[in-house]
Image: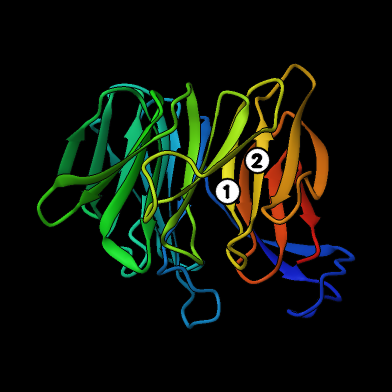
Amino acid sequence: MLLSCLRKNKVKEEEADIEGFQYKTLRTFQHGVRVDGIAWSPETRLDSLPPVIKFCTSAADMKIRLFTSDLQDKNEYKVLEGHSDFINGLVFDPKEGQEIASVSDDHTCRIWNLEGIQTAHFVLHSPGMSVCWHPEETFKLMVAEKNGTIRFYDLLTQQAILSLESEQMPLMSAHWCLKNTFKVGAVAGNDWLIWDITRSSYPQDKRPVHMDQACLFRWSTINENLFATTGYPGKIASQFQIHHLGHPQPVLIGSVAVGSGLSWHRTLPLCAIGGDHKLLFWVTEM
């Protein structure tokens, strides 16, 4: 696994005309096992002295690995064991980065501290597909299950406090909107679905999106009406789409060889997806 630092080339924060990127390899982390997922800690800083790199991975051996580095002498990692099947999602708590939540095909959601000790354990009714921690709702955790149910858990009482229903399966991915805590989006079957949790436990809007089954859903970090979806990885390529709730059709359509993962830039309408030994970037107008 290669960790690279990307820096903008001829790009200002307010510009959407992306001409390209330069990158510099800062540190190579030897992982040893296929990486299935990655989550970055909010403690990560490259503009501090010393810099702090902290992230965790989920791997094919059903373990979580926590990596910490100052890009100099400190290079540590810790293994978190407990899941008995593939891990489909993991995330750091967004405020302090002192806990990690993960969901798995083993029908559990688990919360770990940075010492690798489980601090909470939720039994699910089907495989856990996505887990989200919102920076404005740090005592609540959103967990999406393959059977089409999305639950919100109160981490103080460790009880479910709200549930949403997609009414279709399989639910493959869900995401809590960063810019509007009342909005939740997901993909299930061939459709994308949007909830307003103040109005109903059923979707307010849905639309067919990927004929080969939808795979991933991610809200933009800067616009509550902008989101991206991917189709299920096929033999040759995966379809990638960017949508705006104000437009009946996708505002951008792309194709990625062996597509995997989906992420938005923190301050730009820029979306990235992993391809065949490549990272691919798309930019869209607001």
Q: Residue lying farthest front? A: 199
Which labelled disc corresponds to residue 229? 2
The amino acid type found where label 2 is placed reads: Thr
Determine the image quadrant of residue 189: top right
Mark 2 touches mark 1? (CB < 8 Å) = yes
Point out residue 102 in the picture as x, y percentages from the top left corner: 33, 41
The amino acid type found where label 1 is placed reads: Arg
Point out residue 64 in the picture as x, y percentages from the top left corner: 35, 39
For residue 227, side relative to residue 57 (left or right):
right
Point out residue 277 in the picture as x, y percentages from the top left corner: 74, 37
- Dot 1 falls on a residue whose secondary structure is strand
Q: Residue lying farthest left? A: 157
Closer to the chain start, of discs 2 and 1, is 1
Query: Would you call the spot at circle 1 few (<14 residues within 10 Å), some (14-19), or many (20 or more)?
Result: many
Vertical placement of residue 36 versus 218, above or below: above
- Residue at 25% in and 30% down: 108
Which labelled disc corresponds to residue 218? 1
Q: Nearer the viewer, residue 185 or 239?
A: 185
For residue 83, side relative to residue 87 (left or right):
left
In the rendered image, the quadrant that contains the C terminus is: bottom right
Q: Residue lying farthest top? A: 235
- Dot 2 falls on a residue whose secondary structure is strand
Q: Distance of mark 2 from mark 1, alpha carbons?
A: 7 Å
In the rendered image, the quadrant that contains the N terminus is: top right
- Residue at 12% in and 57% down: 156
